[in-house]
């Protein structure tokens, strides 16, 4: 992604910042941003986590699939136990 300031590359927002924006009421914006991250790094645990959580608001039927993929990619992630409980409800 190129910015307008001398062709410098802008870094993508961190997954944490995206997660925060998702819970601030902009789940669709969080989903768009994290999809850009996942384009570059499809197995990003944080990217998959944020996408799955955003999808719980924007695409509820897709969220479990994404969150299960997150658990497959990062079974020992700090959020894994909570996501497992969420999916088991």
Image: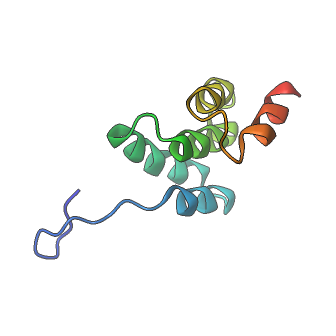
The part of the image, by quadrant, that contains residue 23 is: bottom right
Q: Where residue 6 sits in the image (x, y, percent)?
A: 10, 75
Looking at the image, residue 71 lies above or below residue 51:
above
Residue at the outermost right position: 89
Looking at the image, residue 16 lies above or below residue 76:
below
Q: Where residue 24 sits in the image (x, y, percent)?
A: 67, 63
Instruction: Give the side of residue 4 with respect to residue 35, left or right.
Output: left
Q: Residue at x 44, y 51 (%)?
A: 33
The part of the image, by quadrant, that contains residue 88 is: top right
The part of the image, by quadrant, that contains residue 68 is: top right
Residue at the outermost bottom position: 5
Q: Residue at x 40, y 47 (%)?
A: 37
> How many numbered badges does the structure rendering display?
0
Residue at the outermost left position: 6
**The C terminus - image quarter:** top right
Q: Where residue 29 sits in the image (x, y, percent)?
A: 51, 53
**The N terminus - image quarter:** bottom left
Instruction: Give the side of residue 15 with respect to residue 63, left or right.
Output: left
Q: Residue at x 60, y 56 (%)?
A: 19
Snapshot colouring = rainbow
Looking at the image, residue 87 lies above or below residue 36:
above
Between residue 39 and residue 43, name the one nearer to us: 43
């Amino acid at each position: 992604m190129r910015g307008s300031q001398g062709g410098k590359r802008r870094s993508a927002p961190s997954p944490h910042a995206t997660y925060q924006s998702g819970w601030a009421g902009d789940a669709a914006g969080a989903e768009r941003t994290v999809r850009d991250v996942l384009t570059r790094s499809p197995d990003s645990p944080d990217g998959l986590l944020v996408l799955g959580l955003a999808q719980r608001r924007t695409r509820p039927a897709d969220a479990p699939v994404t969150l299960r993929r997150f658990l497959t990619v990062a079974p020992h992630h700090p959020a894994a136990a909570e996501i497992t409980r969420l999916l088991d409800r």
